[in-house]
Image (cartoon, rainbow, N blue to C red):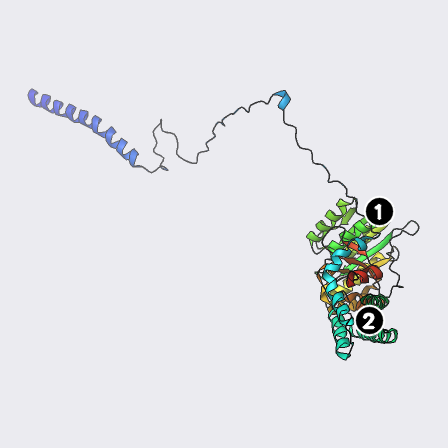
Amino acid sequence: MVFLIIAIAVVLVALLATAALVVPRRQRRVFDDLPPSHDGLTETEPPRGPTVVTAEPDVIEAPQPAPETAAVPDVPTAPPVETPEPTAGRLTRLRARLARSQNALGRGLLSVLSRENLDDDAWDEVEESLLGADVGVAATTEIVERLRTRTKVLNTRSAGELRALLADELVTALQPDLDRTLRSTPTGDRPAVVMVVGVNGTGKTTTCGKLARVLVADGRTVLLGAADTFRAAAADQLQTWGSRVGAETVRGPEGGDPASVAFDTVKQGTEAKVDTVLIDTAGRLHTKVGLMDELGKVKRVVEKQGPVDETLLVLDATTGQNGLVQARVFTEVVDVTGIVLTKLDGTAKGGIVISVQRELGVPVKLVGLGEGADDLAPFEPEQFVDALLGEPE
């Protein structure tokens, strides 16, 4: 009996010892198999979850320059103010450029007129040349008839005499007695106000910037108004032109009221006592009634502070007779007082000067003869015809 009790006790001790060894192993395997989100974690294992790692930044010491080679920060400097070339005689200085593009017409006319026998066919060629240069039907007919009569009466045959006759007729057709003065002189305490208008694509904003240079070259102080609020680029471009000659630019928010910008420009120009306020308006198609009405509004709002002294219409010389259609609409809306003809350097259609003036009774006051900053010149009929016909032989 005693032996049986001892045997049972030994077996129990062995079973307990075996359990003590097996259970921890099983628990460790269970815990190892648990997913990270499980709560059964050992005391030494950190909780698993979002972790923010903050790394110590590497500290790199920049080499210290020697005192004598220490870098000096760049200080932005304002662009130098340019001095535009005088406008007096500018067309003469640009004569060679004009002659290169125009004298094909002049030489063609002189070649026909110098023929030994000026028959009907010859005069038909003269007429076609003038019409091709956009002189216009009425003006062409008048010029040809007068030339035909004078050459017959005077029995003119030499090239020099024929050139003189043709030049005289062309100058007469250009109406040299028209007043081409650019009204840019202040009246009393109020600056002269010049509005620049035109259709899209005529180079209007560029012409406005060049006109600022013309005024500065003639001794005027100028304030620019960027009333083309539809295009931020137009205001930027105008401001760049103005800064080159020391002229400030008034501008408003993109898409803002152009009449408000124009009004503020005149007001600030009066307060600053400048000589001339130059207002650039948005280009618009003459067929868009709403936009043309808006242009009329701009002028009416400006006139609350006084009259607009000059309204210049910018026309592209290459558009030919279509430019006349545009011009008529603009003159009806804003009472155009002067024409600026651009791109005369690249066309043989210089006769548009004659037809525009004849049809509208509005003088051409300025002509653009190139892309240079000072390639805008006061129009002088005699100088223009001289370049048109080329050098006399």
Gap between marks 1 and 2 measured at Cα: 52 Å
Q: Secondary structure at mark 2?
A: loop
Is 334 rendered above or below residue 276? below
- In this orientation, which residue lies closer to the viewer: 59 or 173? 173
Q: Is residue 290 visible?
A: yes
- In this orientation, which residue lies closer to the viewer: 112 or 229? 112
Question: Residue 216 at what x, y percent from top left?
Answer: 82, 48
Is 72 rendered above or below residue 274? above
Badge 1: residue crowd in 10 Å (few <14, some 14–19, many ≥20):
many
Q: Earlier in the sequence, mark 1 or mark 2?
A: 2
Question: Residue 263 at what x, y percent from top left?
Answer: 82, 53
- In this orientation, which residue lies closer to the viewer: 116 or 385? 116
| Residue 221: image tag | 1
- Which quadrant of the figure has residue 167? bottom right
Is 69 rendered above or below residue 156? above
Question: Residue 191 at what x, y percent from top left?
Answer: 87, 51
Q: Along the horizontal axis of the image, is 233 left or right of 25?
A: right
Q: Secondary structure at mark 1?
A: loop
Q: Amino acid at mark 2?
A: Arg
- Which quadrant of the figure has residue 113? bottom right
| Residue 3: image tag | none
Q: Say which residue label 2 marks.
A: 157
In this rendering, the label closer to the viewer, 1 or 2:
2
Badge 2: residue crowd in 10 Å (few <14, some 14–19, many ≥20):
some
